Amino acid sequence: MKDLTNGSIVRHILAMAPPIMAGMISIMICQLVDLYFVSGQGDAAVAGVAAAGNAGFLVNGLMQVLGVGTVALMAHAVGRKDRADANLIFNQAVALSVLFGLLTLVAGAVLSRLYMRSIAADQATIEAGTVYLLWFMPALALEFVMQVIASALRATGIVRPAMLVRVVAVVINIALAPVLISGWGTGYALGVAGAGLASSIAVAIGALMLLAYFRKVERYVAFNPAQWRPQPHHLKRILNVGLPAGGEFAMMFIFMAVVYYVLSDFGAATQAGFGIGQRVLGLIHMPALAVALAAGPIAGQNVGAADAARVRETFVKAALIVTTVMTGFMILAQVRPQLLLAGFSNDRETMEIAYLFLRIISLNMIAQGLIFTCSSMFQALGNTKPVLLSSATRVFTYSLPAIWLSTRPGFRMEYVWYLSVAATTLQAGLSLWLLRREFSKRLTPVRPAETAAQAEADAVAPPARAPA
């Protein structure tokens, strides 16, 4: 366990952010590996695997519920030196991860074909996507347990082991994909089934490695089967923090669906250019997101320790780092966007659209970085409802005007990007205002040695009588 209530906050952030970013990059690579090796199986296979991958986005929402709830509550417990509560939250989260994993397997078996029928264009794509999902679902189910273990480690200030496991899993996936998909060395090609199986085997090995590390090295919290029996009060604590954060994924899903809808009349080149630009934008956002995710446990432990000044300092330092990083990327996107987009496509029209998209959308990079930071602070405070509120505000202030504008004569795709910049800037302003309000409510001056439990007890205790 690493005590984040002492020492340089900037040093803590800079130590934790790189491993977090490396883990995120490895996840993105893992998602691209299947598409790369499946490309040799034909267009239907590629379309099926890509469409099936969208189901993972919804599962990630459930993972976010577990991850955010676990990190926030465990960080609070670590900060106030309440090891018993940290262990209880961890084991209740483990029980939830098993339940969510089983539900994912059942849903995959029952709904995969129905899901593919609702989004695929032809029967070949439906078959390819269904087969891939059935073999990929074990990987998604195992991810829940990995998420809880990694979140528990992050709450205690440890991030490197989870990153290393992710990297190893990606290497295993890359090694297995050509063997299972194309039959390299075996002569027995499984096609899209091999893509899903390669991912499931890689994640299974990664889960076993992370479990072995946790049982051998981790000492602050541990598996305790006696605490796996569901306890409604503590499950409610986890879900109260995690569910709004999971709802944020639903808002993002709606936002992206509206973008694709309003661009549908501009043709394939426009959607391709947007897709390329959006993928590059995701990579650009990773350093800022990693800094924000690193700041969360630091602020969370200090919330538990009732050190209001250090919580505020964590936000200020993280916001400054994020703003500096995003300013650099914004300038690069404005001056030389081709450096960020090089190699993605040889089609001139597609790349011109991607350049235009990145130039315009980069204007909101600083605002997006602040949104990441505010979101992490809300998680640290244990109240993620404002995150859902700000995300919903962005969706509605963008979606309704975008759909209306798309019906007007003279509508141009640039309007979509400028509207997105305005909506994101509005969300950043709202997030900052909501965070300031939350700070004023939650970070009242208290005695340094006073724990959160003691403060609550003082608040409900009757006033003492004056001596006669």
Image (tube, rainbow, N blue to C red):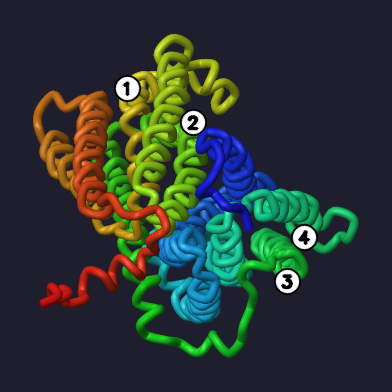
Q: Disc 2 residue type? A: Ile
**Label 4 crowd (10 A; few <14 / some 14-19 / many >=20):** many
Outermost residue, front side: 468
Quarter occupied by the N terminus: bottom right
Residue 18 screen position, x and y as percent: 61, 38
Q: At 77% across and 60% down in the image, what residue appears?
A: 180
Outermost residue, right side: 185
Q: Specify whether 50 is left or right of 309.
A: right
Q: At 34% across and 69% down in the image, what residue appears?
A: 454
Q: Which residue is mark 2?
A: 284
Q: Specify whether 311 is left or right of 390.
A: right
Q: Which residue is mark 3?
A: 215
Is residue 121 visible in this depiction of the protein?
no
Marks 4, 1: nearer the viewer: 1
**Is 226 placed above or below 312 here?**
below
Residue 43 screen position, x and y as percent: 57, 48
Query: Which of the two labelled residues, at mark 2 and mark 1, occupies the earlier sequence position?
Result: 2
The quadrant where residue 344 appears? top right
Find numbered disc 2 in the image and state the secondary structure of the residue it sits on.
Answer: helix
Find numbered disc 3 in the image and state the secondary structure of the residue it sits on.
Answer: helix
Q: Which residue is mark 4?
A: 180
Find numbered disc 4 in the image and state the secondary structure of the residue it sits on.
Answer: helix
Asked if marks 4 and 1 touch (Cβ < 8 Å), the reply is no
Query: Which of the two labelled residues, at mark 2 and mark 4, occupies the earlier sequence position?
Result: 4
